[in-house]
Amino acid sequence: MKKNILYSVIIGFLIILYSCDVIEGDYMTAGTTNPVDTASVVKKVLIEDFTGHRCPNCPSAAAELDALENAYGDRVIGIAIHPHSNFSIPNPLSSSQYTYDFRTLDGDNIDDMFDMTSVGLPVGMINRIGFNTNHQLSKEEWGEKVQEELEKDPIFRININSNVSNGIGNITLEVESLTNLNSSYNIVLCLTENNIIQWQKNIDIDNEEYNHKHVLRKILNTTFGESIGDSFNSGDTWDKNYTVNISELENQNENYSLNTSFMGNGNCTGWIEEDMEVIAYIYNNSNYEIVQAEKTSLIN
């Protein structure tokens, strides 16, 4: 009888030991064998608002984004992308208005991939659902799609820790799988900025003190991010640390404006760290659908 009990203890120990092996997939490491408590993890939705400072109807889309944020709180996360369209072209620096260049390499790459400006601005994507036939959504469609997405269960948790001071520091990402998955996923890490006071066309008014929010400044790990793996068990984790130098990132945008963007003038710096946010999102590589997003302030 005692021998049977001893054998049972040994077998149980070996089962626990082998359950902690590292699974296949980039950076993912196995978590506990206990079920993950998802009660404190909520599904969040990313709205990508494609806009332009010369677009007369774009402020109404920005207002819709504000309304959805007010309605759902931090469960809705916005990014304003100023792609390479006529609505985004800046004037020469000698002009007295519309001289700021909001365009970025990453924003242009996203626009090229999802073909957003071809249908006219404003237009948006909600978690990039419906690609590639039904993803270009008018602002009137955003609310319904947001609600549909928020009703889905989260499959990942994202934690962001930003330790940036005087333009230099680190951002740490930690991802946890909340369920077993057998699909390939990428993570994208962005910097955005609020409260950029610049010119904006609003119907027939030229507003020189318009508050531009959620403006995409830079994606830190390439436009379409990096792999977190393609096989997950509940509780598996992935983490990575990123070094941030705001001046270098500003210089990269300035070079893009001056040397690549059509009629770029290099007037795209002056970033204010206290108004910046860090946004991370995870998407499925098979259909580009964003399955979870998170944000925090750059300065905490």
Image (tube, grey):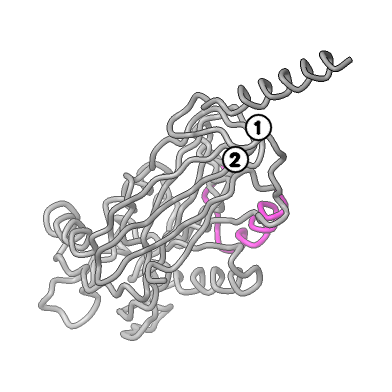
Q: Nearer the viewer, residue 198 or 70?
A: 70
Q: Which residue is mark 1?
A: 180
* Highlighted range, magenta: 134-152
For marks 2 and 1, give the CA distance: 7 Å
CB within 8 Å, label 2 to label 1: yes
Instruction: Measuring from the top left, give residue 69's x and y in whole percent.
Output: 58, 70
Instruction: Measuring from the top left, give residue 6's x and y in whole percent.
Output: 78, 18
Q: Quadrant of residue 91?
A: bottom left
Q: Is 66 within the magenta?
A: no
In the image: residue 59, left or right of residue 106: right
In the image: residue 129, left or right of residue 258: right
Q: Which residue is mark 2?
A: 177
Outermost residue to the right: 1
Residue 262 can be seen, yes or no = no
Q: Nearer the viewer, residue 72 or 294?
A: 294
Instruction: Measuring from the top left, give residue 261's x and y in whole percent.
Output: 19, 55
Q: Nearer the viewer, residue 123 or 267?
A: 267
Residue at 56%, 44% in the rendered image: 176
Q: Quadrant of residue 218?
A: bottom left
